[in-house]
Image (cartoon, coloured by chain):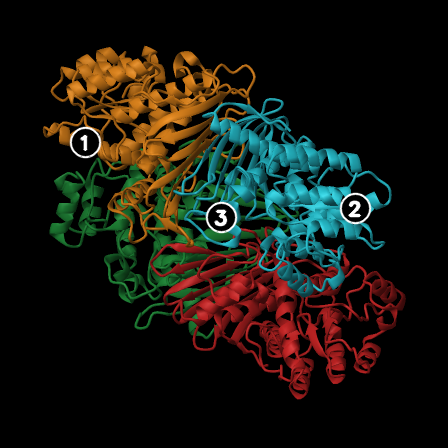
Chain colours: A green, B red, C cyan, D orange
Amino acid sequence: MVGGGEGSFIGAVHRLAARMDDQYELVAGAFSSDRERGARSGAALHVPSDRIYPDFETMAQAEAARDDRIDVVSVVTPNDSHAAICSAFLRAGIGVICDKPLTTTIEDARSLRTLVRQTGLPFIVTHTYAGYPMVREARAMVAAGALGTIRLVQVEYPQDWLSEPVRSKQADWRVDPAKSGPTGCTGDIGTHAHHLACYVSGLEVETLLAELSTMVPGRALDDNVGMLLRYKGGARGMLWASQVAPGDANGLRVRVYGERGSLFWVQQFPNQLQHTPLGEATRTLFLGMKGLSPVAVAGARVPAGHPEGYLEAFAQLYTDAAAVIRAHADGHRADTELDLLPGIDAGVRGVAFIMAALRSSEAGGCWTAIED
Amino acid sequence: MVGGGEGSFIGAVHRLAARMDDQYELVAGAFSSDRERGARSGAALHVPSDRIYPDFETMAQAEAARDDRIDVVSVVTPNDSHAAICSAFLRAGIGVICDKPLTTTIEDARSLRTLVRQTGLPFIVTHTYAGYPMVREARAMVAAGALGTIRLVQVEYPQDWLSEPVRSKQADWRVDPAKSGPTGCTGDIGTHAHHLACYVSGLEVETLLAELSTMVPGRALDDNVGMLLRYKGGARGMLWASQVAPGDANGLRVRVYGERGSLFWVQQFPNQLQHTPLGEATRTLFLGMKGLSPVAVAGARVPAGHPEGYLEAFAQLYTDAAAVIRAHADGHRADTELDLLPGIDAGVRGVAFIMAALRSSEAGGCWTAIED
Amino acid sequence: MVGGGEGSFIGAVHRLAARMDDQYELVAGAFSSDRERGARSGAALHVPSDRIYPDFETMAQAEAARDDRIDVVSVVTPNDSHAAICSAFLRAGIGVICDKPLTTTIEDARSLRTLVRQTGLPFIVTHTYAGYPMVREARAMVAAGALGTIRLVQVEYPQDWLSEPVRSKQADWRVDPAKSGPTGCTGDIGTHAHHLACYVSGLEVETLLAELSTMVPGRALDDNVGMLLRYKGGARGMLWASQVAPGDANGLRVRVYGERGSLFWVQQFPNQLQHTPLGEATRTLFLGMKGLSPVAVAGARVPAGHPEGYLEAFAQLYTDAAAVIRAHADGHRADTELDLLPGIDAGVRGVAFIMAALRSSEAGGCWTAIED
Amino acid sequence: MVGGGEGSFIGAVHRLAARMDDQYELVAGAFSSDRERGARSGAALHVPSDRIYPDFETMAQAEAARDDRIDVVSVVTPNDSHAAICSAFLRAGIGVICDKPLTTTIEDARSLRTLVRQTGLPFIVTHTYAGYPMVREARAMVAAGALGTIRLVQVEYPQDWLSEPVRSKQADWRVDPAKSGPTGCTGDIGTHAHHLACYVSGLEVETLLAELSTMVPGRALDDNVGMLLRYKGGARGMLWASQVAPGDANGLRVRVYGERGSLFWVQQFPNQLQHTPLGEATRTLFLGMKGLSPVAVAGARVPAGHPEGYLEAFAQLYTDAAAVIRAHADGHRADTELDLLPGIDAGVRGVAFIMAALRSSEAGGCWTAIED
């Protein structure tokens, strides 16, 4: 693991997710740019002291030289450092599980993509919501034609936690362009919404028209974004993401409408999926019920009616990644776009999405292509 | 009443709404452009045969000449005829309750506004949703500063009934440009969403950016519209209206976000209003509870927990209109914008909204001012 | 109308319900036991002064003697006076629409039943919840075998309004044994719950085991009741009614479980009905959707997605009663138990239910038969 | 661990729960009464072969003799074997985490209690629902007097999975008196409902009146149970548990009503808690929001709006148990009733509850004391 030292939220989540299905062991890390803190963090995590590294370059080289080298590295640092860290490990021949967004510039994202293709190494981007079984059920239903041709995709991601000026470790880097990249809300959560809309609908956004706004005075980055989207093939949609919307702590929701029906999924109640066949009553599908697709069945750890949540979704990505990593170890290439698991292509598209939104908004609102 | 003969849905709704609170008696009408049908409809409604008229011009002149003339006329015909009918009655000195949208051209709308101002007669536009008590509670709370400065207004109005090519009296004129005007979904339900967003937030839309789409092949008018909105004073918002969205029969919903909290109202569960003070738990306010504002208290007919609905909201507009009509009969002018009741200004703004959306979309998506 | 003078809640509701579908005209009444108040109330309702009566006996005799006599009388007085009033009108040859519960003693209830059978006159008891279209849909589905054999019926009716000692016209008589009869909560709302459970399931309660409790110190009657129920044919169930349950203003809910599925209806969201076929997803049926039974279709006044409520349900009983009254006027007997409309038998069973609950509770909890 | 071999559901859940917060390591076990299967199961779990035991007696003795003996044993076998297994480990000086219900006879339960008191060893019963943070929030609110004196506790636990005759490893032992004990539904899930009602309300049931029923022909044990409950101090309540109720996979819900308000918690949406102060709007409290009690804050692993579920609740019990075990190792007695964690007393009361329900029902319905 790189990053994730004392006080890191997302680092602890990655570790818990990795541990849940008993597929990983944490054996090495560069947990902090502060050497002492890194050492203390590693010790608390029972990492052998000779594998607690002062920085990621040292770690990449030292691990690459070991016989019992790590199988994969988790990168859980702020956005601006992803490119350099991921590159170092890929060059050292080690696969990567990287937090999103992939990078803060599209050039870095494309370079990483090149590197992944050259090396053929596993590369996973943790768009967590792709790990929820009922999201995968939705994706499978759309792919199987349950809705007919898709016409509309409406996605939204309201949060409330930046409604006022906030000071905290989590908040500070998210409103700092140097660490977050050129957008705030758009990159932090808009990119999750974009990925989810595409993941479920099976469509790609062709062009978008965005307005980024900053509602809290003095904030350097956007805290609200509204978009109109045109998907390849003719579907239309809207995307809203906000960090200044009291009422939802983490209100990610996606609705997909086709000629023959619709699907509706809400992250805060993730074990349900509403399916309305055109002209019929809405059905509330639920995790663990009979008749779900194999991908949803595979994601259930407990029987129907026993709720699962965010950590299980995150664990699912790690467990799926373990399969990819094992396959790679057995000699299979892992650089082609993965089916259920977001990989380098999803990562690059996420960055391209951010850049297109920014360009559209700065131009005063005009249709802008996503160039990945 | 003009229109509302046999087979008319909205005519029957207007009559029931007028009857509910026992403030109106139906005494005259021109119920159909088909003379026999009009006579038959009037007779079925117990209207005296000498006050069943073959057309609206005859009715306006004949009623104007009677001592026991009607106090007000309800206009419930397709959109394209509103301008001529309303003008005829206003010129005859008779106030009007008119269905929305007001007219099919902005010029007609402005002419009506001039006429209303010249005559000082009562003029009500039936944006029904403004009659729900909990919508009025929301408006009162915003006006009282419960949310602080408003930052965001998100409104949506999905329906499913035109997801396939549909043939019916209700559907036919709504997809016919000659009767509906130059838009379909935008004018039919987008205008309700626009009115509701403004009514609750107390804000006016300054400019908008819209994309009108037609999802059902062969349809002449839009059946889906997405918009970005800039409100006067700096608030931002989005508006989505669709007639091809399975899952909601009539899914009008509005969310208003301010510095200090938010409100959320859903038409299909109209007796509730969700209020989230920033940083606190969401409160589910409900019709009939203690502590609501006088406007919400006034709109409740039964005790808390006994649901009221669309017909009661419609009745509220008629009951409020009765007060305006009586005040006018007592010598008060009634042409200034009414507080709770949508009047001519709301009507004109509604048409201007439709025209701005159309222009923006035809221009390929650009910010367009609402010019009323 | 007998009762329903100034300040009466339920009288106004009956009048509005009668007016809604335009099937009734209010032409006579004895609105109050206070003569002046009765006269004032009648005048405000535009009742001709010669048909405003000082008391119900005078009214029954005078109306019976007129050629244009009333078609039916609505009895909306406190429970203790129902028996005498209903008897007077039945003896005068006039049909009755009576509020529930029918009487305060089982002997009175049985006497009324005898009288109804002797006269063959229309007699309706306003168990309002039987007027909701989706309740009728549920009843029709059970009757059609959609759930298979019924195993369980769970019904509950929590209210909060008597959580503290309350003084008001509505509250006073409900906690006064002289006016309410020997029970409080059990007779006031338990009886609605009992009727609804039987109405939807098509079953009759054979024996019950009840505990009536009084939670507010100093109250003379029960404000909470819990029951176990055995239905004829072997189904089991529970019933809970409470007036001291904060959280629901009027929380009537019924769930019916059969071998092949279940139905769930909630009065506060009355336009929905949840149907779960065994092993499948829950379907949310809604008023106005395609495929409902004729009885539910007949009860819808506006299109799907436009909510209807308590007043429409009440109006439905009046509209159905109008059909019974007309049929009677055309020479048909009306004393047999009506299909959708609660009549004298439902009324008597309601009183017998109250008496059985009281006996069971007073005996310290024992299985007690309902003897109607 | 004793039990939990191949194909065991609850064994895998216990292991995952123990692993989640990184407080346990699985080092020994007697995983199956089938020796080969036990060995295979242990090997798959990476348990050293010398600590995979053929039966629980051998394990208890062998572990007791080791310096690196286990700190605690998890007992996850069918109900009938709990007493013997727990006794063996307690006698060997090893603390126990035991699945519920504790035993199949009250005598066994009491003997275990005596043994726990004699040894002073840690003993935890996994009433999982006591691990949900919002359940603990509810308990803390009641204890702090937020509802005033408690008047009513309504608890229900409908499931659907035994609506038809079912054959599976999970179903078979649950409908077999030899393995489950003398009740089915009552012991399997009624006991969870009973514990939850007491845990949240802080009350104990004094007497109960129950009817156990068997709805599926040919089934040897009850699959539905209804009860009236009298709590010590005067509160009243009802309890319903069913395995033949389509519509809920696992519908545990509890409502607690006091003089000043109510609380409502639903297991299928566990991160919410509804609080209605008397006369005010319902507040939807949620995991991670500001202002919760320390016990709810301590139970949150991810930020507000990121759902947690059943496995996290189960993990919470294990994590709390780890604290108890460490405290015991440091010389503290652990046999007194634990505050947040269900211990031996809760286990004995659970068995006494089952026996009282059975006696009441067999007597044809009479108030029966819980004798623990």
| Total numbered badges shown on the rendered structure | 3
- Subunit of label 2: C
The answer for how far apart the CA atoms under marks 2 and 1 are is 74 Å
The answer to which of D351 and C341 lies nearer the viewer is C341
- Subunit of label 1: D
Instruction: Give the residue at the far left of this rendering.
Output: D331
Q: Is residue C61 left or right of residue A321?
A: right
Query: In x, y percent, where is residue A323?
Result: 37, 36
* Residue annotated with mark 1: D324
The numbered mark at residue A265 is: 3
Q: Residue at x 73, y 37 (%)?
A: C339
Q: Residue at x 16, y 42 (%)?
A: A44
- At label 3, counting other C-alpha atoms closer than 10 Å, the crowd grade (few under 14, some 14-19, many 20 or more) is many
Query: In x, y percent, where is residue B372?
Result: 59, 81
Amino acid at the residue labelled 3: Trp
Where disc 3 sits, the SS reads strand
**Looking at the picture, does residue C359 appear above or below residue D363?**
below
Q: Is residue B55 left or right of residue B206?
A: right
Q: Residue at x 73, y 83 (%)?
A: B93
* Residue annotated with mark 2: C325
- At label 2, counting other C-alpha atoms closer than 10 Å, the crowd grade (few under 14, some 14-19, many 20 or more) is many
The answer for how far apart the CA atoms under marks 3 and 1 are is 40 Å
Query: In x, y percent, where is residue B343?
Result: 62, 76
Q: Quadrant of residue C68?
A: bottom right
Q: Nearer the viewer, mark 3 or mark 2?
A: 2
Where disc 1 sits, the SS reads helix
Amino acid at the residue labelled 2: Ile
Q: Residue at x 43, y 75 (%)?
A: B234
